[in-house]
Image: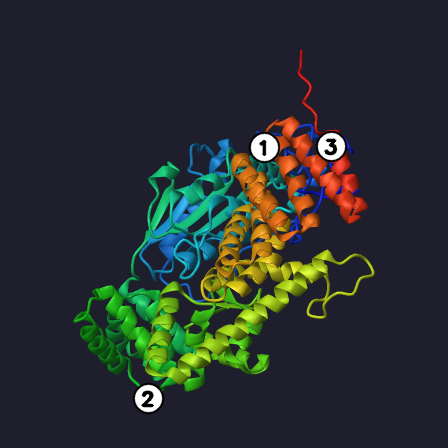
Amino acid sequence: MTATFTPEHASEEATDVATDPVPCGVSSPTVNARTGHIGGSHDSSGTLLGKKQRQQLGTVTPPLNTLPGLPAGLIGRGDELARLLAALDPNADDPENGASGRAVVATVTGTVGTGKTALAVATAHEAHRRGWFRTVLFVDLQGYTPGAVPVVPEQALVTLLRALDVRSPDIPPTMDEQAGLYRFLLHDLATRQDAPVLVVADNARTADQVLPLKPGPGRHRLLVTSRHAFPELGEARRVNLGVLPNQASIDLLINILAESDPDDPRTIDTEGLGELARACGHLPLTLKLAATLLTNHPRQTPRALAARLVDTSKQLDQTDLGTSSSTMQAAFDASFENLSERQAEMFVRLALNPGPDISTGGAAALAGMPTDDVEEVLADLAAAHLIRHDHESGRWSMHGLLRDYAEAQRAIRTDDSPRTAAAHEEARDRLLNFYLARAEAAIGCLRALPGDDIPVIFEGRDDALAWLDAERTNLIGIVNTIADDRPHLAVRMSAPLCEYLSWRRFLNDQLTVAAMARDAAQAIGNLQSEADAWNNLGSVLQDLHRFNEAIAALEHARDLYQQTGDSHREAAAWNNLGLTLRSVHEFSEAVIALEHARDLYQQTGDSHREAAAWNNLGLTRPLPTNR
C-alpha cells in the first residue's frame, strides 16, 4: 500500500502519512495511521469522521441527472408507465396523504427485446420532470451485455459515489463501507435538496448486484431492470413487460413511417401493418427494424415484407432456434441484407470492440477511415435501428441481440474470406493502438505537474480523466481479449489502466487487471513486469483489506525485484510490505521491512522516498490501549 504525503491528502492529525508510489506508477490514497483506514475519512462502519470530512464529501446540491437521453418512440406502454410512476411517487409516502408502507424498490422485468431499459429511462425522466426527484442516478450493471463482465456491487457503488461528487481518496475500500457512505449521502442530499433521490440500476443479472444499492430509509426509490424477478429485494413493485399489443405494434410502425413521410399511403394499410406486426412477434426491436426497411423501400408493401419475414422465420424454425429467436433473426437478416457493403462491414466490425459502446474516434480506427466519413456510416446504421446513438455522450452502442448477430455475421465473413479475416485483424490492431496511445497519453496528463507539457491528444487533466471514465469498460475488455495472443501489449496496457483504476478507486477492476497483467508477464517470461504486477496486486489487496493475500503478493514482488537486481523497486515493495504488516499489527516485522526500504532508498539516492520510509517507521508503533 502506498500514498504520497501532500497537504490535500493529510488527515485530521496532519502528520499521519507518508509513502511511496507503486513501481508502475499506481497512486493510492492515504492511510490514517490512527485508525488504519484507507482514505482518512471513514471508520470501519462507514460513518463519517468529523465536520471537516463531511464538508469534503458529496458536495453536490444542484439538481443532478445522469440518465441516458430520453428514448424516442415509446409507444404502447402507457399502462406500464403509469404503474411505474405510481410505484415511484415519493408523495405516496407522505403521512398527510394517508399512505404508508410503499415499496422503495420497483422492477421492470421481461424477456429480451421488450424494451425494459427504454421504459425505465422514460419513466425516470418523467418522474424527474414532475419534480419528484431533484437527483436521478443511473448505473448500467451490464448483466447481459455481450462481451462485458457483469458489474459487481463494489463497482456500481463506486460509480454512484463518483456521481455524488465523492473524491477518489475518500471512497472507502470495502462494499459495506461504500454502501454505508452511499446511503448517508443520499440522506444528506435529500435533506439539502428537500427532495428524495431516484436510482436506476439497469440490466441486472443477479440480486447480489442490486441489494447493496437499496437506498435505505426515506422516500428514495430504486428502479431495477432485469430479465428476472428478484424475490430477495423484498416487497418490490414489479412491472412485467410482454410483447406489445397488436394495436400498439401497428401504431409503432405507423409512427416511424410517418416520421419519414407523413403522406406515406402505407400508414393507412392497417391490415398489412397488422400482418407485419405479427411477423415481428410484436417485439419493439424487430418492429423498428421492419419499419425502417419499409421507409427505405417506398414501393414495398407491409404485407410483402411480412411474407418475407415469415418465410425466413419458418426456415430458421427448422434449425435449433425457437419461434421468438427465429422471428428476431428474420428481421435482423432482412435489415442486414438491406445495408450497403460499407455499412455492413462497419456493422460487423463494431463487434470487435470489447465493451458495450464506442466513440466515433474508436469506430474510425476500426473502419480505417476519417472521422467524418465513419460518422456518416454510423448515422446510417442508427437510422436503420441497428445501433443507437447517445447524443449527450456522442457514443454508439447496440442491443445485445444485435451485438451477437454482428459477431455471427463477422465470423461468417472471415471464415469465407482469408482476405477479410486479415482486414479484421488489422482493424483490431488499429483499435488496440488507438486505445493504448490514448490511455498512455491520458495518464501522462494525470501525472503532469503545473508547467509540464501535456500530450496534445487531450486539452488537459479533466479531459483526459473524462476519456478514461468513458472508456474504462473498453480498456478492461481490451486487456482481457489480448492477454493470451498479445501478452506483451496486455502488460503494457495494464500499466496506465491500473494507475487510473487506483486513482478512481475501482478496486475490483484494478484487481482483475493486475492479475491479468501478472499472468501475461509470466507467459512471456518478463520478471520485471511480473514483479510490477505482483506489487500492484499487493497494493490493491491491501486496499481491499485482504491483508494476508496482500502480504503474499508483496513478498513475491520483493523476491522478483531481488532477482532482477532492481533495488529501487525492491525498496518500494519492502515499503508496501511494511505498511501492510503494520495494518495487521505485526509491528516488529513491519519495522524490519520499512528499515529495508529506508536503506535501499538511501543506497539508490532517493532522498524523498527515504524520508517517507523514515516517516513510516516513526508511525509504526502499537496503538495505545484505552484503560
- The disc labelled 1 sits on which kind of residue? Gly
Which residue corresponds to mark 3?
617
Circle 3 sits in a helix, a strand or a loop, which is it?
helix
- The disc labelled 2 sits on which kind of residue? Arg
- The disc labelled 3 sits on which kind of residue? Leu
Mark positioned earlier in the residue sequence (1 or 3): 1
Tell which residue pokes out farthest to the right in this image: 451
- Please state the horizontal and vertical placement of residue 119, each as a whole percent of the image: 42, 57
Distance of mark 1 from mark 3, alpha carbons? 28 Å
Distance of mark 2 from mark 1, alpha carbons? 65 Å
Residue shown at 67%/32% (left/top)? 592
Distance of mark 3 from mark 2, alpha carbons? 82 Å
Q: Is residue 391 left or right of residue 484?
A: right
- Please state the horizontal and vertical placement of residue 477, each as a whole percent of the image: 49, 60
Dot 3, crowdedness within 10 Å: few (<14), some or many (≥20)?
many
Q: Nearer the viewer, residue 503 or 583?
A: 583
Mark positioned earlier in the residue sequence (2 or 1): 1
Mark positioned earlier in the residue sequence (3 or 2): 2
As drawn, the label of residue 46 is 1
Q: Nearer the viewer, mark 1 or mark 3?
A: 3
Which residue corresponds to mark 2?
299
